[in-house]
Image: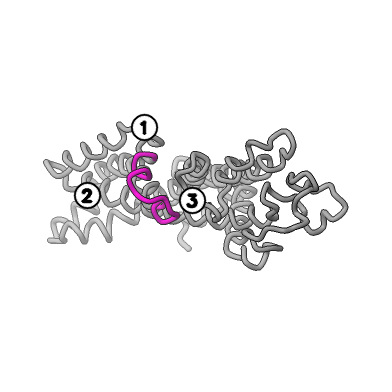
Amino acid sequence: MTTQWRTAWRRFARNRFALAGGAIALLLVVVAVLAPVLAPHDPAEQFADGLTAQGLPVPSTLPHSTKFILGTDQLGRDLLSRIIWGARVSMTVGVLANAIAVGTGLAVGAVAGYVGGRTGDVLMRITDIVMAFPTLLLAVALVAILKPSIWVIIFVIGAVYWTWIARVVYGEVRVLREAEFVQAARSLGASTLTILWRHILPHLIPTAIVWGSLGIATNVMLEATLSYLGIGVQPPTPSWGGMIQQGQNFYRTAPWLIIYPGLAIMLTVLSFNLLGDGLRDALDPRQKR
């Protein structure tokens, strides 16, 4: 581990909020990966004793709450199992969509910033055009054109969120391309691809890490929003946003149907935002050691 990364780790370790965010984020990832093991029931299974005599969801306060720790939904399905499986959906969408967004943004911003000229102008005007559209409206339009599924959601979110990191990377590369080590590599005959890959990309890793962690929180929120609108992950696949949408008609008689999925979304977004803020401060070279 280089001195730079050791220093960054010391800064990060001193930030209690960042450590808490990282611990919660890691826990969410573990829950998502181990969902088949951790979930007490099949998230799609409807239990005969999961509904009251009036056909309403069973609350967690009934005597047999050990079977349904968080209660059931309007179809008699175990809410805890659905929230655990919903974590898998949210983490899958958040991580994969963000990988697409960060990868696209790095590529577009680096090429535009280093090559410049007409190529750079065209790439950045395309970026500006995509940024001009309201993000949610653009995502809704793309999902409406395509058939909603988890893979379509991943593609759509990645396709609308790459522009911000592209803008940041473009500015950084414009500065890096005038650095002495880049000019030395250019004078030795190194190709554009070699310079971008071996000399410029390593300096963009901190930016990618910070945007990668912050972007997961944004993507989880967007996936929940699309699912709440009914054009995201389709039933019976459990999604936190879809669970809130399905349970909103029972908010008086069964408030846990919207409270628990809402808390899951809030905790996920908060943890990754705290982690991203901590990484940003730790990787900032202007910070004191």
Which residue is pictured at 21% across the width and 36% down the height?
A: 125
Q: Of 274 and 172, which appears nearest the observer?
A: 274
Q: Main secondary structure of the magenta part?
A: helix
The reply to whether the magenta stretch includes residue 144 is: yes
Among numbered discs 2 and 3, the one appearing first in the sequence: 2
Please, what is the three-letter code of the amino acid marked with disc 2? Val
Position of 167 relative to 153 (above/below) = above
Left or right, residue 132 beside residue 153: left
Image depth: mark 1 or mark 2 in front: 1
Q: Which residue is mark 2?
A: 111
Q: Is residue 279 left or right of residue 84?
A: left
- Check residue 233 in the rendering and tell me which mark sits there, or answer none: 3
Tell me the crowding category of disc 2: few under 14, some 14 to 19, or many 20 or more residues within 10 angstroms, Cα based.
many
Which region shows up in magenta?
Answer: 140-154
At horizontal 32% and vertical 45% (from top left) the residue drawn is 145
Q: Are marks 2 and 3 in contact (CB under 8 Å)?
A: no
Residue assigned mark 1: 134
In the image, residue 55 above or below residue 84: above
Mark with earlier residue (3, 1): 1
